[in-house]
Image: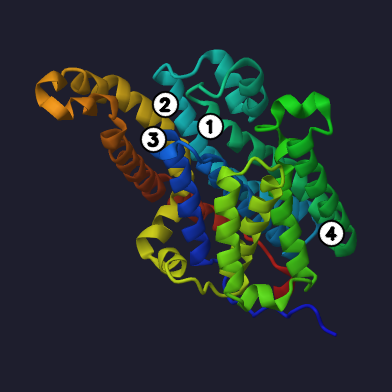
Amino acid sequence: MNTGTRLPARQTSYYPRLDGLRAIAVSLVLVHHLGGILAYGWDQGYYGVDLFFVLSGYLITSILVRSGGTFRQAYATFLGRRTLRIFPVYYLALGVIFACGLATSSDLLYLCTYTWNYFAKSHGSPDNQLFYLWSLSVEEQFYLVWPFLVLSLRKRLGLLLCLTTAIVLTGYSQLAYGIFPSMTAYNYTGLVNRMGSLGIGALGAVLVARRLMPLRILHSGFWEFACLAVLVWAQVATDKLRFPAMGVCSLLLVIKCIHGEVHMWGLRQILDMKVVQYVGRISYGIYVYHIPIAVLMEKYVFDPIWLSIPFDEFGVLNKLRWHSWVIKFPLFSGLTVLTAAASFRWIERPLLLLKDMWFTTRSEDAG
């Protein structure tokens, strides 16, 4: 009996609905950081970052498994393309952050070397304005280590499958049960601790490459409802199984957006909206810029105006003074999107063209 499926042939490496997922992920992060009482009672920020991790794990592994050329060529190409995609915006933002006094020279050392995820957890706190950059450190550490392993085993997918499974189990076991006590302090920010999410994306890519993904997952709309139900449960549950449950749901949504079809009314329309897909395309800039913009706008523009308003004269509306998020959330989010759009237009897009000129990928399928 054939339990697998030959995936539909695709002529493109760009999948617009993945940008839709990115838009959802970054929107959840914005709500978590800027949404005031909208963020209370559920852990949308965790899931937003988790979805980014699963996406990264899947896409990076898929690219590496299909890559042609020698190990050295493929590794250099991957790192070169990642460098042009990630570094310019990141270091530009760090320059602005430092110039505006939002980071100390000590902070800058760890931020520049992508080790902030460990320093911020050890010496800072989640209240640190720059704490959110920990996730970029995790991804960069992943980009340095994981390609080496995948490219070494791309001809031995069975062994890669075993390795990826072990990494997923280790990552989620550490996150849920703290099997390595010395790493428990970094459960939220450590590479090993978050390898469950990155690894489950990678595991999905290997399963697809080996034709082991069941056909019903790709073509049944039931799984979308099941995923959303599990994600809602995971936001309010305290059960430790919620961590891998969120990862599995994210993976299924990613795979359906690439190889299958999205059936759920509402979700399909959101993922197919051009404006949503555009937000997904500029989501990296949105993530990098949103906190500096919010902090600087609040300090130098918003608070001076807001604190000068005579709320006592507003009668029943005087309680609005305690809910400034009603204005801050759309204002800061809108400014962030505009900044990210400008960054994408004049910084990221030209560099993406250079990326394709200097570091062209060659798939084995293409010979």
Instruction: Please rate how many residues cluster around mark 4, counting C-alpha atoms within 10 Å: few if below 14, some from 14 to 19, many from 20.
Output: some
Where is residue 194 drawn, in percent x and y? 70, 40
Where is residue 288 drawn, in percent x and y? 47, 37
Circle 1 residue: 132
Cα distance, mark 3 to mark 4? 42 Å
Looking at the picture, which amino acid does disc 1 mark? Tyr
Work out whether 188 lies above or below 307.
below
Q: Of label 2 and label 3, which has the lower sequence position?
A: 3
In screen coordinates, is 232 left or right of 53?
A: left
In screen coordinates, is 107 left or right of 205?
A: left
Q: Quadrant of residue 122?
A: top right
Q: Secondary structure at mark 3?
A: helix
Instruction: Please rate how many residues cluster around mark 2, counting C-alpha atoms within 10 Å: few if below 14, some from 14 to 19, many from 20.
Output: some
Looking at the picture, which amino acid does disc 2 mark? Val
Mark linked to residue 161: 4
Q: Of label 2 and label 4, which has the lower sequence position?
A: 2
The reply to whether callout 1 and callout 3 are in contact (CB within 8 Å) is: no
Circle 3 residue: 37
> What colour-coding does the image apply?
rainbow
Residue 3 seen anywhere in this rendered image of the structure:
yes
Work out whether 75 lies above or below 263.
above
Q: Of label 4 and label 1, which has the lower sequence position?
A: 1
Work out whether 65 lies above or below 109.
below
Cα distance, mark 2 to mark 3? 29 Å
Residue 309 seen anywhere in this rendered image of the structure:
no
Cα distance, mark 2 to mark 4? 42 Å
Mark linked to residue 96: 2
What residue is at 68 percent from the left and 45 percent from the top?
243
Which mark is nearer the camera, 3 or 4? 3
Looking at the picture, which amino acid does disc 4 mark? Leu
Viewer-closest of 249 and 155: 249
Cα distance, mark 2 to mark 1? 16 Å
